[in-house]
């Protein structure tokens, strides 16, 4: 049984076991507090204060005993043998037994002590290795997933100081070993993390100075001085001021790895001489690289499955070291995952864990036999640099992060094969966890957090930015921020804070593409949200299928486009935030004519895909058609606007998607007016009348129907004219004016008497049947419904046919229907009845 | 199983309801197959109920009328639940639909304000999106329906809720009623009756205007701050009381509402005329009838505020008949600013 507390709490039943943690927070607090004070007795009183800082319940002592019992049970479950007597009851409380082999914080202290001893003895190589290992045990802040009580806060501060000491000792030792160039990046990060800690600033100044970057060394001092003055009103300490003066003077002694101090060991003397051969030659070949990683991110969240998988892939196998390419879209968190995994795998790679930016000129440290090193090559754009690092020797591992999937890069087969891991966006739980990680958000507003995460596309960078925004501006609620993000045109503008800029990240990524790919990406931004197929892409790009396939697959390789199999083939999807970025770029970079032509091609393709209006299971989604209609309108394609809106109509009606129905059809009506298409105006007005009727807005419905009637009359469209009369008759019927309804329906039947007007006659008969019902004449109604059934057969419309059958059946069979089905799926119900009368005849004991 | 009997089956309707205030119920099929074949659905089904907000309802429009009465939603679910079960899920019509759980949360209180609303046509419209999910399916017939509700008033999303319906076979239902009555008869030692004739609460204190719409008595309080009232049936409007001597759902829910408003007013000084229930969770536990007295005990919590700073009081209520729980509710009374 092993415990890790230098980061989120982890229990490992064995070396290969998956880390687990008690689910209940209180249980974790008990275990965490005991582990922080391992081998010491923590009093029950202190544990109670830790568990309930403000007001312990009356039953606190009993509850604590229950927690201890549950804890022992959990440990027994994980390791029946090793957990025996692990948690001891010792007056006045409890204690956990642990050793450096079973608890990471004890191992940390042990390594640090050994490192300090080695440093004192002048064995800087050993000191660097030991202190590097000690610092590498940290995976985040102490017990990062626990609410800090008094004891944990005190321990957290103490151990954070010890961690900084370990880093300081390691850096100090490595500087003595002459590794100043390698240290610069890490020291920059440490300085940012500890802005007023003078030792790290001093080390960075030294490293810069020895790397020939005197100006930057002086700037570091200037920045520190400003910070200290502003925050504390003090000047840097005497040692740093002296270092500053030495740099100003151009002290050559400072250039030496010992900084002018006398060397203390034989090994050190050999490496530190003025020969110019440098320390590298002195300590090779067994010099450990130490940990050269960015610090673990305290807000790193979730990714349990991916971490486990990555760690599994990185475990060196027999016959060769592991090589893994971690790929994924921009902002998906590849580097964060790689760094997190590296921090967790300190035990596997004791000789060093190093992150090297792929685009930097710094050479990656070469592999050396019998050394166990994890090398992260971050942001590789192509296979060249990776090839130079293959094969990976046994015991070591290479982890490459890359936006591209780097297809075609072959490695050796067998255990040392190059493996790929594609990183996707967050699961919903992970998004919510990150949004609340800083603890400033109320987790109870889960719906708002989920909505916010969804608007961020669950893209880790976007979610992180939203989390930072909510933390930086506590007066913003998740709900409020979500409302701002709803405006598509502004979403990317909101997702920016400090150095985190989603649009900037996308821009950098897109600029790495070729001109042709950039253009393709922009054009895809024209498409409605959601999936599309190759035919759609080909139409949009104005290319043949093979060319379109090459173009989209190139974007798939670049992790900018998602591709997946569907029952009918392959579908593609541009992630929504990227789609918004692409659309914005397209508008900025394209000539208006090109844009309009592309929009026209897309509209034509959607129209073709939608098939004829009224299809029951149309091949495209209503939402896509609505978007396409809007795009058509934006580019002045009036006819396409009309036709796309009409194609979407039946789908919107079926889903009662009233808002989209109203907006799209009003837009289309305007388009029809602009192109003076009177017949379309008639159809769209009637559709808007139907919508208003369905929503029980009689006056609005009447207005639309009257307008539609006049238009249909003017273009001599008899069936359309009949349909508007039916709509008006329905309104009269609803309001109890039965003779007016009958008159309109008679006229409708006359108008639709001609051949090819079966739909008009169907609708007229439908409302005639309803009229008969209103007259309480079911047999007459049956006649009209029977006529509907015949006409539905002629129309080959299964939906209308089913409606007619159902209506006929309802006239004869028993029914509990409280009203009447007016149209397929649309029921008219009487007003809500007061309960006394509604249940007056209710069936006691099933009587009817 | 203990269920409350908000019966959901309507009378045989006229062939064509042309009453003023009729509503539309729209079925939005997720798949056309069941619908075209008229085969019962076994999956989730979606509906929208749309209609005018009532302006002349004898109960819902009685009182200061500051808010629309949220019991509209309860009524909608009561009415539509059984219809949907019978018509779209193939549940035999002799199975009585009973609601055993109901919850409603008003998410946008401003939309529920009746005073000053009524923009556009008429008095405004309420649309209720209903998602019905069948549960406990035996031989392709569900025994239960879970309903989820999303409410909009004049297109403004303003509430969400859920309800659970159970459909009992006739024999089972009869047995359930008989058992319930027998239990009450056979435990005279548990009898719980008012001392004398209960005096109705003042209409203004329960948010109503007419005396015959008051369904709870003047409360008695105890040292623990509990308000105990009796449900009234005599002299109460037939709109509320069933004609068959059974306790109707509306009667019970109105009693819970009135008790909660009364308790919040007396304990925390909330003005009943500007109050509504911002959140309701009701569990129906057992059958009750009106021939035995029903007691409602309301326990108001501390006065707090909702997210907009409005004073709010949580009230826990229990309705009992001869000391047996009939319904339990957690209501939050909120007063507009």
Image (cartoon, coloured by chain):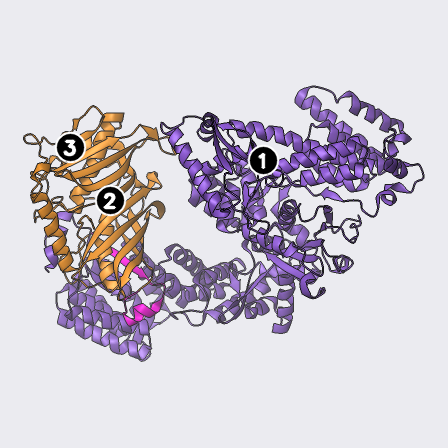
Chain colours: A purple, B orange
Q: Chain of mark 2?
A: B
Q: Secondary structure at mark 3?
A: strand
Mark drawn on residue A187? none
Q: Position of residue A100 (x, y in %)?
A: 63, 38
Q: Callout 2 environment at 10 Å: few (<14), some (14 to 19), or many (20+)?
A: many
Name the one closer to the observer, A269 or A764: A269
User: What kind of element bears circle 1?
Assistant: loop
Residue A579 lies, in percent from the top left, at 57, 56
Q: Secondary structure at mark 2?
A: strand
The span picked out in magenta is B21-41
The numbered dot on residue B283 is 2
Residue B53 seen in the figure:
no
Q: Chain of mark 3?
A: B
Foreground mark, 2 or 3?
Answer: 2
Distance, label 1 to label 2, CA atoms, is: 45 Å
State which quadrant residue A130 falls in.
Answer: top right
Q: Residue at x 65, y 36 (%)?
A: A108
Mark 3 or mark 2, which is nearer the start of the sequence? 3
Residues packed near mark 1 inside 10 Å, few (<14), some (14 to 19) or many (20 plus) = many
- Which residue has dot 3 on it? B229
In this rendering, the answer to whether A13 lies above or below A123 is below
Name the residue located 18 percent from the left edge and 49 percent from the top edge: B6
| Whether residue A387 is visible | yes
Q: Chain of mark 1?
A: A
Which residue is identified by label 1? A142
Asked whether A489 falls inside the magenta stretch, the response is no
């Amino acid at each position: 049984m092993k415990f890790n507390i230098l980061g989120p709490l982890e229990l490992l039943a064995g070396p290969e076991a998956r880390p687990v943690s008690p689910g209940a927070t209180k249980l974790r607090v008990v275990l965490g507090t005991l582990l922080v004070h391992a081998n010491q007795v923590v009093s029950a009183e202190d544990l109670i204060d830790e568990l309930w800082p403000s007001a312990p319940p009356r039953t606190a002592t009993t509850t604590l005993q229950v927690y201890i019992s549950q804890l022992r049970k959990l440990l027994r479950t994980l390791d029946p043998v090793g957990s025996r007597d692990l948690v001891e009851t010792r007056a006045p409380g409890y204690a956990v037994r642990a050793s450096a082999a079973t608890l990471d914080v004890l191992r940390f202290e042990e390594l640090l002590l050994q490192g300090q001893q080695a440093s004192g003895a002048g064995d800087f190589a050993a000191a660097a290795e030991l202190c590097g290992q000690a610092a590498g045990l940290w995976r985040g802040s102490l017990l990062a997933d626990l609410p800090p009580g008094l004891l944990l806060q005190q321990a957290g501060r103490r151990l954070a100081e010890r961690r900084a000491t370990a880093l300081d000792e390691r850096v100090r030792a490595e500087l003595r070993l002459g590794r100043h160039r390698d240290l610069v990046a890490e020291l920059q990060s440490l300085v940012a993390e500890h802005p007023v800690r003078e030792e790290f600033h001093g080390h960075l100044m030294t490293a810069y100075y020895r790397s020939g970057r005197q100006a930057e060394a002086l700037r570091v001092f200037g920045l520190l001085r400003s910070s200290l003055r502003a925050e504390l009103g003090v000047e840097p300490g005497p040692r740093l001021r002296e270092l500053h003066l030495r740099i100003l003077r151009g002290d050559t002694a400072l250039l030496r790895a010992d900084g002018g101090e006398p060397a203390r060991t034989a090994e050190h003397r050999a490496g530190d001489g003025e020969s110019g051969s440098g320390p590298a030659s002195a300590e090779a070949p067994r010099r450990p690289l130490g940990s050269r990683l960015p610090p673990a991110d305290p807000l790193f969240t979730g990714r349990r499955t991916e971490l486990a998988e990555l760690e599994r892939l990185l475990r060196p196998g027999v016959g060769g070291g592991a090589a893994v390419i971690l790929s994924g879209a921009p902002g998906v968190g590849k580097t964060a995952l790689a760094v997190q995994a590296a921090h967790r795998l300190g035990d596997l790679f004791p000789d060093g864990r190093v992150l090297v930016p792929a685009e930097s000129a710094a050479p990656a440290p070469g592999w050396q036999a019998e050394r166990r090193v994890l090398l992260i090559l971050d942001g590789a754009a192509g296979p060249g640099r990776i090839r130079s690092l293959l094969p990976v020797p046994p015991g070591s591992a290479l982890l490459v992060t890359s936006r591209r999937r780097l297809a075609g890069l072959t490695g050796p087969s067998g255990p040392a094969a190059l493996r790929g891991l594609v990183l996707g966006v967050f699961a919903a739980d992970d998004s919510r966890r990150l949004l609340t990680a800083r603890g400033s958000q109320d987790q109870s507003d889960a719906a708002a957090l989920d909505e916010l995460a969804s608007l961020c596309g669950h893209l880790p960078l976007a979610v992180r930015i939203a989390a930072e925004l909510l933390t930086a501006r506590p007066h913003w609620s998740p709900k409020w921020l979500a409302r701002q993000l709803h405006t598509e045109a502004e979403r990317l503008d909101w997702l920016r804070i400090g150095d985190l800029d989603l649009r900037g990240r996308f821009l950098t990524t897109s600029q790495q593409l070729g001109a042709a790919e950039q253009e393709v990406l922009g054009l895809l931004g024209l498409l409605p949200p959601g999936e599309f197929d190759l035919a759609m892409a080909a139409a949009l790009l104005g290319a043949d299928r093979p060319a379109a396939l090459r173009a989209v697959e190139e974007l798939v390789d670049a992790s900018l486009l998602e591709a997946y199999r569907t029952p009918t083939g392959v579908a593609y999807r541009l992630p929504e935030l990227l789609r918004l970025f692409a659309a914005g770029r397209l508008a900025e970079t394209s000539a208006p004519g090109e844009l309009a032509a592309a929009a026209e091609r897309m509209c034509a393709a959607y129209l073709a895909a939608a098939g004829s209006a009224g299809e029951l299971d149309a091949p495209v989604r209503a939402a896509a058609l609505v978007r396409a209609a809007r795009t058509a309108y934006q580019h002045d394609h009036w006819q396409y606007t009309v036709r796309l809106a009409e194609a979407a109509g039946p789908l919107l009606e079926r889903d009662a998607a009233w808002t989209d129905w109203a907006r799209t059809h009003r837009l289309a009506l305007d388009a029809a007016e602009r192109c003076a298409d009177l017949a379309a105006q008639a159809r769209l007005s009637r559709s808007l009348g139907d919508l208003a009727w369905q929503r029980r807005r009689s006056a609005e419905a009447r207005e639309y129907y009257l307008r539609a009637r006049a238009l249909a009359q003017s273009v001599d469209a008899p069936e359309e004219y009949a349909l508007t009369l039916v709509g008006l008759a329905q309104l009269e019927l609803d309001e109890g004016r039965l003779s007016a309804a009958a008159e309109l329906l008679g006229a409708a039947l006359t108008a639709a008497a001609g051949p090819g007007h079966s739909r008009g006659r169907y609708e007229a008969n439908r409302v005639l049947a309803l009229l008969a019902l209103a007259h309480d004449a079911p047999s007459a109604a049956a006649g009209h419904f029977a006529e509907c059934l015949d006409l539905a057969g002629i129309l080959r419309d299964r939906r209308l046919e089913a409606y007619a059958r159902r209506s006929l059946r309802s006239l004869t069979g028993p029914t509990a229907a409280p009203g009447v089905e007016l149209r397929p799926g649309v029921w008219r119900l009487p007003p809500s009845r007061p309960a006394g009368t509604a249940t007056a005849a209710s069936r006691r004991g099933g009587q009817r | 199983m203990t269920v409350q009997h908000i019966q959901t089956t309507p009378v045989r309707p006229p062939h064509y309801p042309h009453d003023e205030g009729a509503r539309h119920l729209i079925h939005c099929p997720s798949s056309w197959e069941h619908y075209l074949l008229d085969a019962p659905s076994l999956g989730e089904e979606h509906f929208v109920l749309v209609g005018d907000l009532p302006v002349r309802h004898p109960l819902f429009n009685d009182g200061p009328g500051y808010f629309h009465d949220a019991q509209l939603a309860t009524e909608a679910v009561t009415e539509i639940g059984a219809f949907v079960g019978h018509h779209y899920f193939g549940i035999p019509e002799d199975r009585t639909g009973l609601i055993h759980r109901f919850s409603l949360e008003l998410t946008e209180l401003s939309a529920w304000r009746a005073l000053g609303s009524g923009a556009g046509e008429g008095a405004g419209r309420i649309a209720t999106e209903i998602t019905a999910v069948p549960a406990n399916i035996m031989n392709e017939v569900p025994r239960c329906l879970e309903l989820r509700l999303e409410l909009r008033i004049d297109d403004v999303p303003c509430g969400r809720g859920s309800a659970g319906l159970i459909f009992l076979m006739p024999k089972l239902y009869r047995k359930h009623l008989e058992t319930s009555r027998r239990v009450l008869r056979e435990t005279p030692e548990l009898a719980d009756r008012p001392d004398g004739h209960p005096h109705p609460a003042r209409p203004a204190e329960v948010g109503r205007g007419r005396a015959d719409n008051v369904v709870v008595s003047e409360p008695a309080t105890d040292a623990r701050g509990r308000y105990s009232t009796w449900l009234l049936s005599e002299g109460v409007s037939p709109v509320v009381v069933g004609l068959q001597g059974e306790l109707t759902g509306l009667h019970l829910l109105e009693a819970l509402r009135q008790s909660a408003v009364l308790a919040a007013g007396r304990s925390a000084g909330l003005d009943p005329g500007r109050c509504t229930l911002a959140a309701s969770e009701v569990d129906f536990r057992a059958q009750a009838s009106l021939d035995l007295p029903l007691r409602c005990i309301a326990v108001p919590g501390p006065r707090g505020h909702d997210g907009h700073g409005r004073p709010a009081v949580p009230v826990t209520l229990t309705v009992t008949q001869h000391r047996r729980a009939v319904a339990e509710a957690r209501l939050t009374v909120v007063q507009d600013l």
